[in-house]
Amino acid sequence: MGNTTPPLSNDVFQPLVAAALYVVEVLAPHVRELQQQLQEMVPNRPGRNNRERPDWRVEVLQAIDRHVQEGDPFDVALDHVVAEPLADGWDPDDPLLRVNLISLAHESGRRAFHYTWLPTLRGHLEKAVREVGLSKRWGRTAALVDRADGRGSIPWTLPMNTTEARLQLSRARTACLIALAALTGMRKSELAELTLDCRLPPEQLGEGRGRYRLKGKVIKGRKLGGEYDQWVTIKQAYDTAEVAASLADRVKNDGHLFKSLSFFTPYEWFLTRVNGPKGRRLGLAPIPEVPVSLRMLRRTLAVEMAHRPGGLLAAKIHLKHISVVTTEGYADCPGGAQSVLMAEFGQEEREHKVRVALDAFHDYRNGIRPAGPGASDLLDFFAFVDEQLDSSGAPNIKRSDQEVTNLLAKRAKSLHLGPVNYCWFLDPSKALCLKLAGAHARGATEPLIGMCDSARCPQATHHAGHRPVWAASAESKKVFIATIGRARRTERTRLSTELARDERVLAEIDALCGTGA
């Protein structure tokens, strides 16, 4: 039985991963500074847990006096916190109603504020509040960051009270979890085993060939307690692990990156922030509110790898980059968990190629023809398949897709998906990309998609789905040509030649694929 976990659609996956990476790469340095400030707010004083510790009155009164001496407003309680004492009969005009008493207790080194303290403190605290007032404590002078949509710079956060500041930390940790799951394809159990020291030293294998590894344990299908394993990943995932380690609670997490892999509630909080006013202020694209799980992120990575070669995984990450690195991880540790993920990639890719070939055959039967130099050969093959279907069995019986698939399977195996064409790589000696590469491509068993010139290669075809890319290419060349001065004749000639090629390909697609006006 195939994998029943549904992948996320691109309109969910792209803004989700882009938002997580924005938090990790842009906001995280400021969140770490905030975390340090929160930790310093509760000093670990000597004698804190023994009889040498001062009386609570002394510590809380000292905290109140510090506010007055420094002219520092007291922290404000959130509306939902204020609602509880109001329900218990507090006077709405009480000057202490909106004081964040829990924050005050933390400043004095106490874990909680006991309301039995209030009669003793009221007079002193009311006077202090009149002098310095109330204001959200954190982020009053927040540093500027670039908006996610590139529309200028803004403070990385609006002022927050202590509760909101702690939620800021929680959402940053959730962003790390989302980014690691989406970029590595790790299972939930494998993410749970990542420790604070999971990053192995990076390796430099040559110019621009840094390799990054994460160490952990694989639990599923292994002996009791799991087995040690490594994941070769990209720098963004490696850096995310570093951020997660810096934000982890080193006591509560017991040496692991994440305290808990409970995902539903933290994700809901993250989604609410991205889709709310704070996310819009940061320029984050809204995320459709559909169910999301860690398993779905793994499945989506496999499908994205198989379906969209050369496409974008998120705002900055090229699938081709991830594919290369992940493949090296598979080769480096062929018995490891990453090989299982690669097997999922491969299976999904094979199934997708068959579906693409089947769609092209159905187009052929509906009178929609492919364009490109390899169209004639592909049409001959489809005619052969059609003939085989007509001659195998009784007449007037509609053949199932499975029968067609069986006949298309070999041709589908040779299919390589490019952003502007399909490459039916049946004969390496005819591949234009290998000829252009010369001796460097000797013995190659796959095309060099990056060197493809599908307008000239005899094994390339163009279909309706490729038209938008060719149209965008033609429009951009028109813009460039219009801005080139008369003195730059060579550049103008080169671009004009390429524009003529693009327009010729577009005309062929429109004429044969039914996309013309």
Image: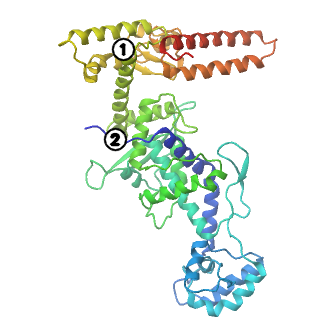
Distance from Cα at disc 1 to Cα at disc 2: 45 Å
Q: Which mark is residue 365?
A: 1
Mark 2 Cα-neighbour bin, 10 Å: few <14, some 14–19, many ≥20: some
* Sooner in the amino-acid sequence: mark 1 or mark 2: 2
| Marker count (numbered) | 2
Rendered view: 182 above or below 262: above
Q: Tell whether 455 sits left or right of 296.
A: right
Instruction: Give, as a three-letter code, the residue at label 2.
Output: Gly
Q: Tell whether 312 sits left or right of 27.
A: left
Q: Quadrant of the N terminus?
A: top left
Rendered view: 110 above or below 326: below
Q: Position of residue 127 (x, y in %)?
A: 74, 87
Q: Would you identify the image quadrant in which residue 7 lies? A: top left
Residue sitting at 52 percent across and 59 percent down?
269
Residue sitting at 52 percent across and 16 percent down?
452
Location of mark 2 (residue): 336
Instruction: Give, as a three-letter code, the residue at label 1.
Output: Arg
Residue sitting at 70 percent across and 18 percent down?
478
